[in-house]
């Protein structure tokens, strides 16, 4: 849907509109263009080319489109610097709820996981577009910031896990402590249902479109949630994935869903109690359950410390762990070498939603910079590479990546 404010009669208006992004799902990117005037009309053209007109002042006329879009009269002057949310609030604009089943809600709706950021400027979008457009061998690295818009929290943002007192399990702790293993798997079992219910965000979908169009040569992700895969991408999973479980003794792997069934079979009463909980805000507060970035949920020890059994490897009876790189562990050599080769051979490297604090990610963008590749970062907040990366954009990925598809040769059909 395209919303734009147009002059009524001969009103005097600025020459350039202010554009504000809003994406409800991956098939529709809505843009609002605002122009200031003493007497103005709001016209809205839907995807089906339907027209809606509402006089702002001096009239109560109202009409709606076939798709159910509703707009009411606005009584407030529109400031030049504003967010889309502010416009909605002041003008009482309401959009119908869209549930595609394959994409997350707009990022602005989840204040708990998505840090606040002003909308990206047109200059920001143009500079990032030009980098994509000029590149012939572009590498993208994504971090937890791209999945916050799907409801999965990150670690280092103001709303992230670290700032709420959470300390992730380390590799050494998991290997050496049976108590730590029980705690991890109990929490992981409890959080699995909610974690796997997350949908790809508008940013995931946009990257998949760019990748399919040949604008992205290689994608690397630090995330373990496989939301990129569900959006249609096939990235190198630098830190592994929680969707498989691996034996630390013989290397045998099995699907996480199968392991979930084994946990349930070994702990039927405990599993029944967990699955009976409704994960609403009251349950979160009552049982201390808070979703964590790697898929587990924080649970009070009294719910798992007394009796929780863990399956062993069916091949060698060895210790099973999630197939992820815990803090304190090393990225497998083959995986690290593949990522480094991509960084050395690219002509552009873009980090999206990553603070680049882990050395496994930081060394990649540093290497790309040293070999002369164009580098850019889109992230809310500071990163480890801010000192040497020339293009740094502080914005939500869901508000900038879909808009790249609206420029020049990057105009591509939606997924």
Image: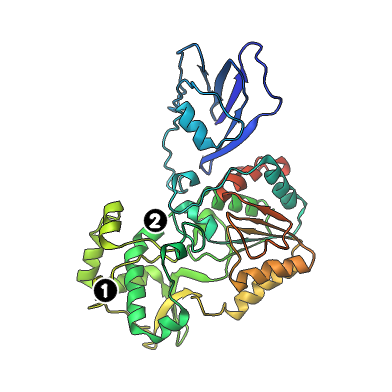
Residue 148 against residue 84 in the figure, above or below: below
- The percent coordinates of residue 74 (x first, y second) are 49, 22
Question: Measuring 48% from the left and 26% from the top, which residue is drawn there?
Answer: 91
Tally the marks.
Answer: 2
Residue 160 against residue 96 in the figure, above or below: below
Residue 279 against residue 22 in the figure, above or below: below
Relative placement, left or right, of 98 versus 347 is left
Residue projecting furthest to the right: 372
Question: Measuring 30% from the left and 55% from the top, which residue is drawn there?
Answer: 279
Pick whichever of labels 2 and 1 is earlier in the sequence.
Answer: 2
- The percent coordinates of residue 148 (x first, y second) are 49, 55
Instruction: For marks 2 and 1, give the one nearer the viewer.
Output: 1
Residue 369 against residue 80 in the figure, above or below: below
Using the rendered view, name the quadrant where residue 192 is placed.
bottom left
Secondary element under disc 1, as helix, strand or loop, is loop
Whole-angstrom CA distance, mark 2 to mark 1, is 24 Å
Question: Measuring 59% from the left and 26% from the top, which residue is drawn there?
Answer: 4
Q: Residues within 10 Å of mark 1 (few under 14, many from 20)?
A: some
Q: Is residue 291 visible?
A: yes
User: What residue sits right under mark 1 in the picture?
Assistant: 304
User: What residue sits right under mark 2 in the picture?
Assistant: 197
Q: Residues within 10 Å of mark 2 (few under 14, many from 20)?
A: few
Q: Is residue 106 visible?
A: no
């Amino acid at each position: 849907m395209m919303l734009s404010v147009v002059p009524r009669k001969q009103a005097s208006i600025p020459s350039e509109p202010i554009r504000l992004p809003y994406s409800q799902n991956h098939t529709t990117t809505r843009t609002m263009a605002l122009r200031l005037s003493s007497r103005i009309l709001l016209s809205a053209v839907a995807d089906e080319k339907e027209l809606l007109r509402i006089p702002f002042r001096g009239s109560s006329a109202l009409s709606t489109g076939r798709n159910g879009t509703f707009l009411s009269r606005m009584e407030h002057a529109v400031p030049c610097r504003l967010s889309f949310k502010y416009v909605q609030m002041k003008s009482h604009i309401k959009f119908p709820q869209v549930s595609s089943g394959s994409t997350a809600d707009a990022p602005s709706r989840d204040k708990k996981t998505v840090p606040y950021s002003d909308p990206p400027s047109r200059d920001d979008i143009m500079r990032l577009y030009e980098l994509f457009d000029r590149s012939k061998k572009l590498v993208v690295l994504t971090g937890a910031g791209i999945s916050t818009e799907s409801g999965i929290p990150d670690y280092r943002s103001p709303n992230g896990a670290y700032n709420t007192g959470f300390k992730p399990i380390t590799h050494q702790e998991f290997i050496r402590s049976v108590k730590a293993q029980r705690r991890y798997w109990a929490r992981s079992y409890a959080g699995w249902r909610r974690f796997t219910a997350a949908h790809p965000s508008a940013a995931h979908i946009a990257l998949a479109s760019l990748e399919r169009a040949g604008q992205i040569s290689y994608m690397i992700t630090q995330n373990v949630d496989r939301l990129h895969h569900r959006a249609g991408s096939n990235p190198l999973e630098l830190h592994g994935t929680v969707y498989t479980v691996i034996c630390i003794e013989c290397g045998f792997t099995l699907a996480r869903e199968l392991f979930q069934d084994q946990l349930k079979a070994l702990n039927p009463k405990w599993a029944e109690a967990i699955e009976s909980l409704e994960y609403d805000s009251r349950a979160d507060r009552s049982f201390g359950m808070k979703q964590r970035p790697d898929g587990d949920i924080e649970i009070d020890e009294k719910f798992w410390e007394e009796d929780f059994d863990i399956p062993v490897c069916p091949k060698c009876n060895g210790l099973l762990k999630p197939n992820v790189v815990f803090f304190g562990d090393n990225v497998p050599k083959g995986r690290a070498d593949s990522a480094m080769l991509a960084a050395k051979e690219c002509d552009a490297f873009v980090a999206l939603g990553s603070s680049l604090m882990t050395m496994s990610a930081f060394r990649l963008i540093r290497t790309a910079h040293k070999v002369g590749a164009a580098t850019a970062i889109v992230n809310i907040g500071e990163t480890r590479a801010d000192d040497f990366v020339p293009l740094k954009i502080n914005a939500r990925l869901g508000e900038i990546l879909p808009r790249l598809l609206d420029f020049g040769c990057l105009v591509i059909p939606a997924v």
